[in-house]
Amino acid sequence: MESVTISLFLLLAVVVSGWLSRLSPVSVPTPLVQIALGAVIALTTGAAVDLKPDVFFLLFLPPLLFYDGWKIPKEGLFRDKGTILQLALGLVVFTVLGIGLLIHWMIPVMPLAAAFALAAIISPTDPIAVSAIATKVPIPKRLMHILEGEALLNDASGLVCMRFAVAAVVTGSFSLVDAFGAFLWMAIGGIAIGVGVTWVITRVKGMIFRRIGEEAGSQVLISLLIPFGAYLLAEEFHCSGILAAVAGGITMSYAEQSGQALAETRVRRNAVWDMIQFTANGIIFVLLGEQLPSIAFRAASVVQLTGHTDPLWLIVYVAAISLALVTLRFAWVWVALRFTLFRAARKGLPVQKPSLRLIAATSLAGVRGAITLAGVLTIPFVVGDGSAFPARTLIIFLAAAVIVVSLVLASVCLPFLLKGLQLPPEPKALAEEDAARAVAAEAAIEAIEQLQNAMKIGKKDTELYAEASARIMELYRRRIDNQGLHGEAATHLRRLEKIERELRLAGLRAEREVFYELSRSRELSDETARKLVREADLMEARLTGS
């Protein structure tokens, strides 16, 4: 009963945090509000959820990472694969070495291996935090795709580095060859398992549903179970469950291109997944806020181990580590972009030099989140000889504080850096959309004509079918004709479509209000009212693109 009550309070906190974020006179990202709300709950009630890292990883990360991999634009992922891999692999190792040495220099009582463990767990950015920041800070699409791709892939490299740094503290030994081999096994094995599990399940599901028919509820449930299956199987073989979930999501997006699922299934599934993402993201940050007071109290009691008596030194450490993270990231991004431009120039490709504002925005957008907190809590309490793990409480505090600082910095600084920022040009999405609609319209006209010819129509129905076909094909022919417009004519058409959309929305809302009014006055049955309102809702969702 207690766990049920806690779950309900967490859900309520997510709802309240959304209200507070919208009521705030200044633009504050919802994750920061949720962290603050979690801390207030812990301080006022004196209780916080006992966060078990293994349970946390299993409950929250597989579905969220799976969905991020599912919806991330693949063309952006593969177009910028070089930049993403440089950030996800090279930057993590660079950060571990640089921040680890800095921490050991600032806090000599923390062994070098323990300092590397802390540096490793704060090196990966968090895709959940990146997505959450983007809801309040409008990050340009291409930069967002790079950040999401980096965050989806760098978790494995950061966690592997942390695992071997912790093992070095516990056992007193370290092997670079073993570490590299383990990384390859975790990465390749995790990706292979994620792809394999998703591919097999979607193929088997397709064969079964072709024989017995499709049920929307079962389809949605299967999509929810896939990330957990991939994650657990990967962990069973000591591979990266995180990469398995990400690879499963990317594979799912390709499997969906077969178009076998019913329209009703896709609509329901999208609604369910959006709700899961919203709820799980919110709970993660509320839980993070609940852990902060107890972590801060324990860290203040061990600050004396660093050779200081004033707890304010903790602020100095956090500020120094956060500044170093941004500086190292800035340096790495600058060098990596220079190298990329150099290679492009060698191949004779046109290059556009990125501005320092873009590099600074990329540096500050590398926010840390739930993966850092959950990872640092897996640090053992004791080492091989039975003694306490050195500075464990201080490590946890520093990691948690870095998460909060990175979120605050991104929230405060990114709006100024991104204002009016110009990125390298991308393919014109609007032209792509128009071309696709025109091709689809031609296919639709051909299908209507074939169906009309194939149907056995009586003489008296011939005119009726011809009229119905003409009305439908007129819409498609107009779409094809509009696709060829350019310049002033295309601009006029866009304005016309915008006005038409606004008028349609006004009409739909008026229709819906009438349906509700008729239902309240008992002039319309509940069943019919629900049907009519659903039709209006689907049409409005189509017009608004939601």
Image (tube, helix red, strand yellow):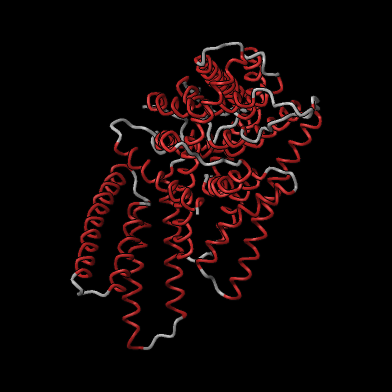
The image shows residue 492, relative to residue 455, as above or below, that is: above
Answer whether residue 167 is visible to the viewer in this image.
yes
Identify which residue is drawn at 64% across, 55% down: 198
The image shows residue 533, relative to residue 395, as above or below, that is: below
Identify which residue is drawn at 25% across, 55% down: 505
**Residue 256 placement (x, y as % from top left):** 55, 57
- 15 vs 249, left or right, is left
The image shows residue 539, relative to residue 109, as above or below, that is: below
Identify which residue is drawn at 45% across, 46% down: 10
Residue 480, image quadrant = bottom left
448 or 383, nearer to the observer: 383
Identify which residue is drawn at 64% across, 23% down: 391
Answer whether residue 154 is visible to the viewer in this image.
no
**Residue 182 placement (x, y as % from top left):** 76, 36
238 or 84, nearer to the observer: 238
Name the residue furthest bottom: 459
Figure label count: 0
**Residue 363 placement (x, y as % from top left):** 51, 24
Residue 242, image quadrant = top right
**Residue 145 placement (x, y as % from top left):** 51, 38
40 or 422, nearer to the observer: 40
- 392 vs 175, left or right, is left
355 or 219, nearer to the observer: 219
